Structures are given as structure tokens and as C-alpha cells.
Image (cartoon, rainbow, N blue to C red):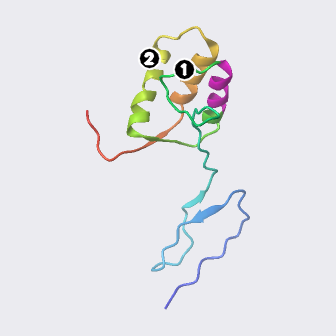
Amino acid sequence: MQAALPAMSFVPKYPTIVVFNPVNPAPSPYVCNMRKVIAAMNMTIDGYCDHTAGLPDEEIHEHYADLLRNAGVALYGRITYQLMEYWRTVLEKPTGDKAMDDFAVAIDGTPKLVFRARWKV
């Protein structure tokens, strides 16, 4: 016998996940609003992607800082996460470049979720 989903007494602003336990069909207090997933990567128009090939300018730092300030979480692979640890040094010793320093603050304030197959310490 399949239990019916509990009725929702509100209209969610975003797509919503309601945690439902078929054994105990009472409405769950765990309601999660889903957010957009935005993939962001530095890449040239011809598809070239190499973080060592050039330095991002002020406009790029401002763009990504804005994305991070509005993000619920940043998703990284292990290697990218370890590369992004550089920004902690900018927090400790600011560069004097407003865009870079603001980006360091934004990335530090964003929760991170790291996907990995293995982790070497």
C-alpha cells in the first residue's frame, strides 16, 4: 500500500523538496528550497582553458565575486579546491587590488562542497 503525499499549505517561491517518509506520512519539518545550479569556468571563446596561461582582470574578479556572494554553496573537485586555497593568503595579506581582495572575501565566505576520488594530505 502506497501512502499519499502530504498536502502543502503554502506556495513555495522556488522549486521545493519535501522530505517524505512513507512509514510516517505526517508532513516533515524538512522543506528545502532548491536553487539554480550555475556552472562557471574561465575559458576563451575558442575553448582554451588553462589557469596558468593568463591573469584574470578586474572585470572577471568582480563578476565571480558577485556570483559567489549570491551562491548558497560552491562545488569543487579536489584539485580546483586546492588551487582556490591561494585566496586564503590574499585574506591574510591583501594585495591592494580592490577587485582581487573583494574576490578573496567573497570566496572565503561561500560554503564549499568538494567532490573527490581520493585526498592526499
Rendering coords of residue 89 (x, y %): 44, 17
For the residues labelled 2 and 1, the Cα–Cα distance comes to 20 Å
The residue indicated by pointer 2 is: 89
Residue occupying the point 69% across, 57% down = 14
Left-right relation of 88 to 34: left
Q: Quadrant of residue 88?
A: top left
SS type, badge 2: helix
Q: Give neighbour class at mark 2: few <14, some 14-19, many 20+ (Cα, 10 Å).
A: few
Residue occupying the point 39% across, 31% down = 82
Rendering coords of residue 74 (x, y %): 52, 40
Instruction: Say if the magenta span includes residue 30.
Output: no
Q: Quadrant of residue 78?
A: top left
Which mark, residue 54? 1
Left-right relation of 37 to 83: right
Residue occupying the point 48% across, 74% down = 21
SS type, badge 1: loop
Rendering coords of residue 79 (x, y %): 39, 35
Q: Amino acid at mark 2?
A: Thr
Q: Amino acid at mark 1?
A: Gly
Residue occupying the point 32% across, 47% down = 117
- Which tag is nearer the camera, tag 2 or tag 1? 1
Q: Which residues are magenta?
A: 58-66
Residue 88 vertical position relative to residue 1 in the rendered view, above or below: above
Rendering coords of residue 90 (x, y %): 49, 16
Q: Quadrant of residue 106?
A: top right
Looking at this rendering, what residue extends furthest in the left direction? 121
Mark 2 vs 1, N-terminal side:
1
